[in-house]
Amino acid sequence: MQITRPLLVAAVLAASLPAGAAGPDDGYLDLVPYFTRVDGERDTDPDALGLRAAYGWGYEGPWYNEVQIFGAILETNESEMTDFYMSGIGFDVAYNFGDRQWYTPYLLAGVGIARNDVIPDVDDQTEGFVNFAAGFTTEEISRRGIRLRAEVRYLHDFFQGGRNDWQLGFGVSIPLRCPPPPVVAMAPPPPPERGPVEVKMADSDGDGVFDRDDRCPDTLPGAQVDSEGCVIADQTITLEAVRFELNSDRLTPGARDELLTTVRALRSQPGTAVEIAGHTDSLGNDNYNLRLSQKRANSVRAFLISNGIDAGRITANGYGEQQPVASNDTEAGRALNRRVEMRFR
C-alpha cells in the first residue's frame, strides 16, 4: 500500500494555502520529514525515512492539540521491491514553553493507531501506539508566517508484542490564517456643486457705504451721507442719549459716552461745521427754559472741544420751548421736546 502518496498530496495542498502571520491560537499545518532509528526486532534496515503531517490548534494558554498522520518505508532487502510500510494516525497534546512567536520549546504526548503492512501479508497488523516528543519551533522565517520545526520523538508500537522506534524530524510549520482581504481604494466623492458666492462687504458704521469706499467712517446713526460716506449738509440729528441732571446743564455719564461717539464722527469729517441746539419742554418759565437750553448747548460744545474738536467748527444755541417736535400736553411729548440736536451746516 503506497501510504506516502496521500502525505505528498497533503504537502502540496498545504504549501498552496494562503497564510498570514499566525497568532498563538491560530491553526497550523506542519509537514515534518523524519529519520527513524528502527527497533531491531522488526528485522528491517536499522534506518528509515518517513513523513509526518500534523494539524494543530491552540485551545487554552500554552496547550495545543494536534492530529497527525504519518508514513514510513522500511526496507528488508529480501526482495527487489519495498516490502514493509508503516503508517498511522494519532492525536497528541502539546505544551509550549512560550507563545510560538519566537523560538519556542515544547513537549508532546499522544496516542493513535498504526498500520504495519508487511509482505507477505500474513504479518500485517493494525495496533495502537503511544508517542512522546520534545522539540521547538522557530520564529517566522517568511512574510507568510512559516516557521521551522524540529523534534525528537519516541514511538512505542504494539505491533508483534511491542516495537520501540526513535524518530528525528525537521520540517516546516505553516499557519492557516488567511490574510485580510485587500483594501479597495474608494474614489473620493465629487465635490458639491457650488452656486454663486455671495461676498459680504463690511459697513462698520452702518451708513450704507462699504468700508472700502467710505472716506468718512464713524458716521452718526441716522445721518444721511453721500456716495463716499460723508455727511450731507443741511440736516439735523437728535443726540438721543444726551441727558442732563435735573434742572442742570451737567451731563450724565451716559451722555458723556454718547458724545464720545460724536467726537469720533466729527474727527472723521474735518470739513464739517455743526450747530449744537438745546431745547426744553413748556413746563416752567419761558426765560428760564431759554437760559437752561443755552447752558446745555454750551455744555455739549465744551465737551466736544475738550476732546479735540476745533472750536471754530461748533456753535451752540438754546431755543427753550420755541421749537417743539411733539405736544407738550403729555409726558411722552414733553420727553421728546427735551432734546439736544446737531445741525450740520
Image (cartoon, rainbow, N blue to C red):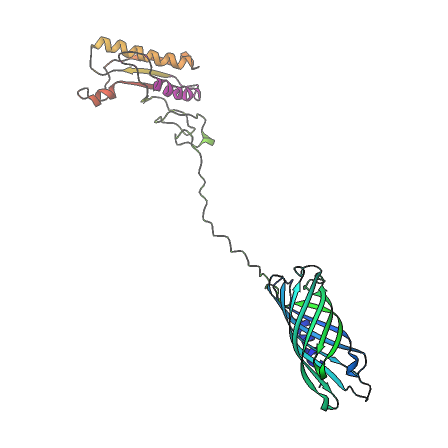
Considering depth in this image, is 95 or 14 the residue closer to the camera? 95
From what the image shows, is residue 342 above or below residue 105? Answer: above
Give the total number of marks visible in the rendering. Answer: 0
On the image, which quarter does residue 127 sit in?
bottom right
Residue 271 counted in the magenta span: yes
Q: Is residue 265 toward the left or the right of residue 60 in the image?
A: left
Considering depth in this image, is 344 or 281 the residue closer to the camera? 281
Residue 273 placed where, x, y %? 39, 17
Considering depth in this image, is 24 or 245 the residue closer to the camera? 24
Residue 255 counted in the magenta span: yes
On the image, which quarter does residue 293 sit in?
top left
From what the image shows, is residue 217 above or below residue 282? Answer: below
Question: Which residue extends farthest left?
Answer: 329
From what the image shows, is residue 291 above or below residue 206? Answer: above
Looking at the rendering, the stretch of residues picked out in magenta corresponds to 244-273
- The residue shown at (42%, 25%) is 218
Residue 216 placed where, x, y %? 44, 25
On the image, which quarter does residue 282 sit in?
top left
Residue 342 placed where, x, y %? 34, 19
Q: Quadrant of the N terminus?
A: bottom right
Q: In which quarter of the image is the C terminus?
A: top left
From what the image shows, is residue 84 above or below residue 274? Answer: below
Observer able to see residue 238: no
Observer able to see residue 62: yes
